[in-house]
Every structure is written in C-alpha cells, then in structure tokens.
Image: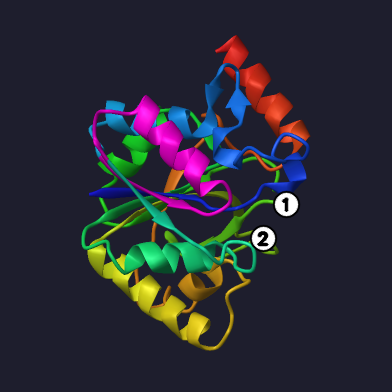
Amino acid sequence: MVALILAAGAGTRLMPLTRQTPKCLIDVAGKALLDREIDILLGRGVDNIMIATGFGHEKVRRHVERTWSEGNIQLVFNEKYASTNYIYSMWLAGRVISDDVLLLHGDLVFDPSLVDKLLDGASENGVLVRRTGELPEKDFKAIVNEDRVKRISVDADGADARFCAPFYKLSRGAFVAWCDRMTDFIENGRTGCYAEEALNKILDDVFLPPIYYDDEFCMEIDTLDDLKIAGEYLAAD
C-alpha cells in the first residue's frame, strides 16, 4: 500500500503564515502538519509514502530528507501547482503508483485511530464519513445511500449528506479507474476542479462505502481559525 499525501497547494487562506512556508509545514502545537501525518502513518505500518508537492517543493524536500530517515518517502512535483487544483497532482502521482492507495490531504489533523478504521474496514475501498453532526459549509460532504457513497461535493446537502473527510482507502483498481477519469478531465482542460468531480463519474461502478466515525477529531486546516481550533485540541489531548 502507498500513502499518497496531497500537499501542492499554496494555502493562501493561511497567509501570512504561508507567504514563504508550504502549508504542510505549518506548525500546529509544536509539530508540522506533514510530520504529524507521516508519524501516524509510520506508526500504523504504512511506510511507503508519496507526497505530491508544488508550492515550496524544495523546502518540503529538504525537510523530509532532514527529518525522516525511516520509511520509503518519495516526492512527485506538480510544476503547474499555481494554475491547477490537486486533481492534477493526484493524476501525476497516479502515473507512477501501482498499488493500493491510502489517500489524504496534507492539511488534515486527525485522531490516529481513524487510520485503523480505514485499514481495518471490511471493504477494499472506503472514505471517512462522520455519522452525525452539523455539515460544515466549506468542507466536503458525502451523499450516502444504501451504505454506499453516491457523490462527494462541497455543495452536497440534504438528509443523506454527511461530513466527509478527504481520507480514502482505495484498491489499485479503484484508484486506476479514478485516475483514468481524471485523464479525461485533464485532456479537456478541466484542471481547476476538485478530483472528486472525476470520482463522482465512476461511483455507479466503483463501490465506495462510508467508513463511519463519531467523536474522533478530524478536520482540514484551511484558515487561521481552523489552525487555532486544531492547536487547542492537540494541546489539550
């Protein structure tokens, strides 16, 4: 299994912290976001890791070389990071990955037990979905029906909508199917959208069940307010 961490974005909503520092290297309660993720993955036996970089690629490369001697950690550089969304970074990584994939965004702060839920799930595919709670306005929501995810979108709502963290377990077959559909998007110039728009096109054929969680902490760090919330949680943990 390969853990693919998407960390190419400039993180403009975290300015001025990200003026010169890649978002994934922003400190939260004494540790960089990326280091927290890698530490948890290695602790769960996932030691084959690929990081999709963009803004601040050289800083990330030097940081990884200096900080992480264990595991097999590779970087794939999206040189078009300023004009593309992570659909392009993920597509680039997909050209060299030939294994099952644990896919996550590089700005996630999460309880380590959520990795166990994904890895131990009965299905070969899955995505983290919070069973209850309010729907966040800016984050992904999943439409879940008959125990399968039918659509993932920031704009999803309604009785079947649940908060969905961008943290997936995917078989090689499912990952390849997603990348193939992303190729269609990229060839048609649709590089500025979320990769989930391509995923939604295959969910009738690819079974993606929700991996439910309840009270475990999991959030994306997009804004300074998010950073404060995550920092307070980690400091109290």
Left or right of 223, for residue 51? left
Q: Position of residue 192 (x, y in %)?
A: 63, 71
Left or right of 12, for residue 33? left
Residue 133: name its quadrant.
top right
Which residues are the magenta region? 48-72
Q: Is residue 33 above or below residue 6?
A: above
Q: Is residue 195 magenta?
A: no
Q: Which residue is mark 1?
A: 138
Residue 143: name its quadrant.
bottom right
Amino acid type of the residue that numbered disc 2 sits on in the rendered structure: Val
Amino acid type of the residue that numbered disc 1 sits on in the rendered structure: Lys
Q: Nearer the viewer, residue 137 or 48?
A: 48
Residue 212: name its quadrant.
top left
How did the renderer colour the structure?
A: rainbow
At 73% from the left edge and 48% from the top edge, which residue is drawn? 12
Q: Which residue is mark 2?
A: 154
Left or right of 3, for residue 214? right
